[in-house]
């Protein structure tokens, strides 16, 4: 939350910022919309978020929420109430979600367009997961020890990720597939193997043929569709924080 507040000044005007629900706070969202022209937010509501419906229907309504006294004490510029537009949507898994946004013009901003805009966020989250977990091996820290080295390592990882994605997109275009139909993990391992093999091969003239062979291999690496869930989803029981002692009764 502290880092998010420091980034608000860098958000440009005429923009829409998509937040995770953990950033649902009046200080951040009101600070985004009040201090600049035409800056808007889009954020999912929490399960315990309370509001008062001002107008509209159950699927698309204008709501009003009270700012907590603690938040107003930290930031006196905050109003007593702040308003947002609440849009109820159903995701691909059938789960119900309410999206809060400052795009209140119903004629210009349709609910379906706002929901589709939020769903694009998951593409970014998937890219982050592929970059951090698949490419960097879920490492908690970078290897570099200097500021310049950290920048170089981050840019190197981003460039490598985009090159892999571009090669996947080229192979998918030739195979008449969507880029997301090809497995990123399998493509990453294949490209790593080809790069190590090319580094040991002195014949650089065969590099175009190597790239063509690589692309042909990528075409066959389609994502396998997972089977549907065979049993209902259940909530696992939480482990006990303290050791439980059971009383033993003497049956004799």
Image (cartoon, helix red, strand yellow):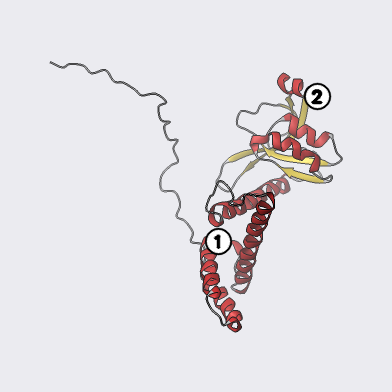
CA gap, disc 1 to disc 2? 47 Å
Q: Is residue 121 left or right of residue 12?
A: left
Q: Residue at x 41, y 48 (%)?
A: 230
* Residue lying farthest to the front in this orientation: 146
Residue 249 location (% of width, % of height): 21, 16
Kindly indicate the quadrant of the structure image that contains residue 16. top right
Give above or below for 249 relative to 43: above
* Residue lying farthest to the left in this orientation: 252
Q: Which residue is mark 1?
A: 184
Give above or below for 146 relative to 46: below
* Viewer-closest of 161 and 230: 161
Quadrant housing the C terminus? top left
For the question of whether residue 86 can be seen, the reply is no
Residue 223 location (% of width, % of height): 51, 62
Quadrant housing the N terminus? top right
Q: Which residue is mark 2?
A: 79
Q: Are marks 1 and 2 in contact (CB under 8 Å)?
A: no
Q: Residue at x 53, y 72 (%)?
A: 194
What secondary structure is found at the residue carrying circle 1? helix
What secondary structure is found at the residue carrying circle 2? loop
Nearer mark to the viewer, of 1 and 2:
1
């Amino acid at each position: 939350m502290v880092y998010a507040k420091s980034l608000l000044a860098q958000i440009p005007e005429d923009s829409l910022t998509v937040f995770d629900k953990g950033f649902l706070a009046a200080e951040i969202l009101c600070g985004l919309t009040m201090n600049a022209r035409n800056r808007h937010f889009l954020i999912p509501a929490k399960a315990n978020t309370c509001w008062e419906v001002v107008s509209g229907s159950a699927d698309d309504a204008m709501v009003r929420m009270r700012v907590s006294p603690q938040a107003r004490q930290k930031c006196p510029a905050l109003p007593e109430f702040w308003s947002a537009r609440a849009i109820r949507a159903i995701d691909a898994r059938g789960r119900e979600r309410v999206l809060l946004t400052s795009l209140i013009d119903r004629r210009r901003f349709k609910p379906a367009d706002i929901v589709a805009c939020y769903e694009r966020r998951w593409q970014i989250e998937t890219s982050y997961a592929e970059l951090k977990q698949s490419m960097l091996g879920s490492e908690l820290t970078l290897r570099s020890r200097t500021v310049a080295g950290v920048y170089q390592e981050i840019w190197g990882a981003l460039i490598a990720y985009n090159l892999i994605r571009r090669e996947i997109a080229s192979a998918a275009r030739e195979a008449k597939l969507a880029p997301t139909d090809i497995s990123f993990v399998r493509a990453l391992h294949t490209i790593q193997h080809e790069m190590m093999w090319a580094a040991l091969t002195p014949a650089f003239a065969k590099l175009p043929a190597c790239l063509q062979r690589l692309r042909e291999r990528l075409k066959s690496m389609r994502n396998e569709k997972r089977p549907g869930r065979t049993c209902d989803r259940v909530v696992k029981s939480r482990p006990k924080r303290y050791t439980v002692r059971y009383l033993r009764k003497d049956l004799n």
